[in-house]
Image: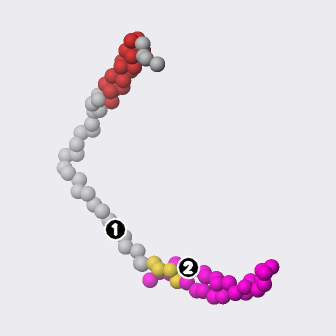
């Protein structure tokens, strides 16, 4: 479906208005009188690792008793 000349003119006018708004300069705050040094503070934490314990458990199923592995883990500070 071809655009009519009036519809095309409206689309072009709308797009040019959007770009004009996007390019208007924004007033910036005055820069500080002295440069501010950037600081990065790092707080090291003790390393963590997982401690696990495992065991076998009897589970009763319709097909018969099954020896089923179980495991429980938790985080420990190292």
Q: Nearer the viewer, residue 56 or 41?
A: 56
Image coordinates for residue 73, horizontal then vertical, percent: 57, 80
Residue at horizontal 41 percent and vertical 78 percent from the top: 46
Give the class, few, some or many, for how many residues have Cα within 10 Å of label 1's Cα (few <14, many ≥20).
few
Image coordinates for residue 62, horizontal then vertical, percent: 80, 79
Query: Mark 1 — residue?
Result: 42
Q: Earlier in the sequence, mark 2 or mark 1?
A: 1
Residue 50 placement, left or right of 5: right
Q: Quadrant of the C terminus?
A: bottom left
Image coordinates for residue 57, horizontal then vertical, percent: 69, 86
Residue at horizontal 40 percent and vertical 74 percent from the top: 45
- Give yes or no for residue 66 being in the magenta stretch: yes
Is residue 29 something one can see in this rendering?
A: yes
> Quadrant of the rendered structure where residue 55 is?
bottom right
For residue 47, above or below residue 34: below
Q: Nearer the viewer, residue 57 or 35?
A: 57
Q: Nearer the viewer, residue 53 or 30?
A: 53
Query: Mark 2 — residue?
Result: 74
- Give yes or no for residue 63 being in the magenta stretch: yes
Which span of residues is magenta-colored?
52-78
In the picture as drawn, the residue positioned furthest to the left comes out as 34
Secondary structure, mark 1, is loop
For residue 63, above or below residue 10: below
Task: Kindly report which numbered mark, 2 or 1, lies closer to the viewer in this rendering.
Answer: 2
Residue 76 placement, left or right of 24: right
Label 2 with label 1: CB-CB less than 8 Å: no
- The colour scheme used to paint the residues is secondary structure
Is residue 17 something one can see in this rendering?
A: no
In the picture as drawn, the residue positioned furthest to the front comes out as 1
């Amino acid at each position: 479906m071809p655009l009519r000349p009036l519809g095309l003119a409206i689309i072009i006018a709308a797009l040019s208005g959007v770009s004009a708004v996007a390019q208007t300069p924004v007033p910036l705050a005055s820069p500080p009188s002295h440069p501010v040094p950037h600081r990065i503070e790092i707080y090291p934490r003790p390393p963590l690792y997982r401690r696990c314990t495992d065991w076998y458990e009897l589970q009763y199923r319709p097909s018969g008793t099954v020896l089923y592995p179980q495991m429980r883990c938790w985080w420990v500070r190292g």
